[in-house]
Amino acid sequence: MSRWGQDRRLAFIDFRLRWDGRLNRSDLIGFFGISVPQASLDIARYTELAPANLTYDRSARVYVSGSQFVPLFPSTNSSHYLSELLAAEAGLLTAEATFLGWRPPMAFVPSPGRAVLADTLVPLLRAIREGRGVRVQYQSMSRPEPSERRLTPHALAHDGFRWHVRAYCDSRAEFRDFVIARMNDVQLDEPSGPGSVGDTAWNTLTELVLVPNPKLSPSHRRALEVDYGMVDGEARMSCREALMFYVLRHLGLHVDLSEHPESQQVVLKDKSQVEKVLAQTPIS
């Protein structure tokens, strides 16, 4: 959607009214660089679409959010707002790239930077786009020195901390995840194996069912049901089998802390199915 299109400006109005609770024509003019008449037309159009969403406070000379506000755009939901707030605080979004106005004081838990060199990423992206292979020097943590690998990459993945490339490994004759930052001297080559169609673990989705740790008190379990948005005491999430290990690690379910329910607040409803998948999914 163009930055200059009216739909985007209406989404801006919707966002600011929801999260700032107020809007001036000057907000539209300053963000989009439009004229005063155009800003007035945009607000009038928004009022036609959602008359209950705003009222004009004549004393403050500002539009304020209505008490029965109902968002018109998906980007006005709380998840989007918090994601933009986090990205802006981390420096990943500039002021021109986000609808955020006033921002509350906030902090986030830092993590070590994981650098991905452009000279490494560019040939990987080209290989994925063109269905080609690559030759790389890869530093596996199971070997003291780097070794040459012939890979056929088909997708990128992020485990919450690091970027990986999903690829067929010629020497292992199987699909694996490879940490991009551990690659050196990436050279385009002919494909060494099948494409993404042959990657069963990547293409297969498995549903994980989370429940509160039964060893917790009833009130703690009820709090977790609300925290995780559980329905009938269960939270369901779908993930690729190839990424299941990373999901479990994020949730603290990759180790057994069953004797410490406060440290392992949610558990898998069916652990046996997950263990079977993990046993069949190699990680480099």
Image (spheres, rainbow, N blue to C red):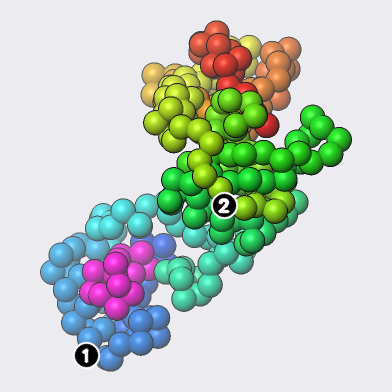
Asked if residue 14 lies in the magenta stretch, the reply is: yes
Query: Bounds of the magenta span?
Result: 1-16
Q: Secondary structure at mark 2?
A: strand
User: Which residue type does callout 1 highlight?
Assistant: Pro
Residue sitting at the far front: 190
Residue pictured at 51% horizontal, 11% vertical: 273
Left or right of residue 97, residue 249 in this image: right
Residue pictured at 33% horizontal, 74% vertical: 3
Residue 221 in the image: x percent, y percent?
55, 21
Residue 169 in the image: x percent, y percent?
60, 32
Left or right of residue 30, residue 102 in this image: right
Residue at mark 2: 188
User: Which residue type does callout 2 highlight?
Assistant: Leu
Q: Secondary structure at mark 1?
A: helix
Residue pictured at 61% horizontal, 66% vertical: 91
Residue at mark 1: 37
CB-based contact (under 8 Å), mark 2 and mark 1: no
Picture quarter with the N terminus: bottom left
